[in-house]
Image (cartoon, rainbow, N blue to C red):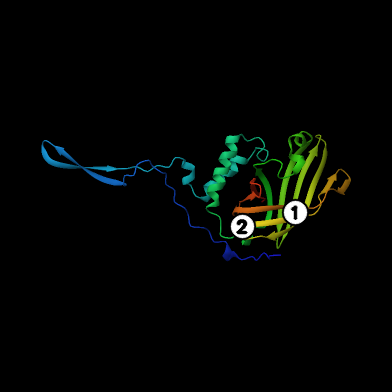
Amino acid sequence: MASLTLSSSFCKPKPIPVYASKTSSNLPSTFSVQCKHRFSSSKTLRLVRAVSISNPELRTGPDDLVASIISKVTGTDRGVSLTNEGHKEVAEVAQELNKYCVSEPVKCPLIFGEWDVEYCSIPTSPGGGYRSALGRLVFNTKEMIQVVEAPDIVNNKVSFSALGFLDGEVSLKGKLKVLDGEWIQVIFEPPELKVGGWEFRYGGESEVKLQITYVDEKIRLGKGSRGSLFVFKRRN
């Protein structure tokens, strides 16, 4: 198994990108045109081509992008209530934040800590059947938490209220394995269910692969092997 080596020297940010929109003209930024004038031999008319950016949000730095993506997913039941356009906007901001991701984020100590699952583009990816359309009718999700502990422990927990009065939680404990500079694999033990005074395990082992696409002191972004986008927010 590849080891997870921690060093702040690995948290080196990528160069800040500069954005400019494409234009249909092949003209240079400035050019001169000789214009004949009947009262003088000639005058030079200087034309300056303006360059604009279609989406002003993409001109901002990482702090503004982080604030933007948090505002877009807050209050959406972790993405369930978002429209298709809303999901598209979240994906666009996540794509821009990826350009500011540190090199080899799996080696960055910022990945460790307690995280709230704030958003997933596929509702059933975190929580499984509890987050399906039918499951949400029975189980009201209170919290979805992921704890990543050094060197290689991952604990997931979903707290819920069943039928509005019976509290419970599902927890999974997993082992983290580094696949490369961006991808990790987590193999989980069978889930443990607690409802009222009952506590038992069910099912078998499971595994997930996740690409870390951005991480800082506030949020972590990840993309699953099937393309699902996750937004994690660090717990205070």
Q: Residues within 10 Å of mark 1 (few under 14, many from 20)?
A: some
Q: Is residue 207 above or below residue 128?
A: below
Q: Give the number of callouts.
A: 2
Residue 104 position, x and y percent, is 59, 60
Question: Mark 2 falls on what kind of element?
Answer: loop
Of 209 and 61, the residue lying toward us: 209
Q: Quadrant of the N terminus?
A: bottom right
Q: Mark 1–mark 2 contact, CB under 8 Å?
A: no
Distance CA(mark 1)–CA(mark 2) = 20 Å
Q: Which residue is mark 2?
A: 182
Query: What residue lies at 72% left-to-right and 55% top-to-bottom?
Result: 186
Q: Residue at x 80, y 45 (%)?
A: 169
Neighbour tally class for label 2: few under 14, some 14-19, many 20 plus, Cα within 10 Å: some
Q: Which mark is residue 60?
A: none
202 and 193: which is toward the camera? 202
Residue topped by disc 1: 155
Number of the front mark, 1 or 2: 2
Q: Is residue 34 left or right of residue 76?
A: left
Please give the name of the residue rendered at 68% of the width and 46% of the height, measured from the top-left corner: 117
Q: Amino acid at mark 1?
A: Asn
x then y, percent, for residue 108: 61, 61
Residue 115, percent across and down? Answer: 68, 51
On screen, residue 154 versus residue 49, left or right, reads right
SS state under label 1: strand
Q: Residue at x 60, y 58 (%)?
A: 105
Left or right of 50? Residue 119 is right
Q: Where is 101 relative to 22, above or below?
A: below
Expressed as whole percent of the image width and height from the top left, the position of residue 65 reads 53, 46
- Name the amino acid, label 2: Glu
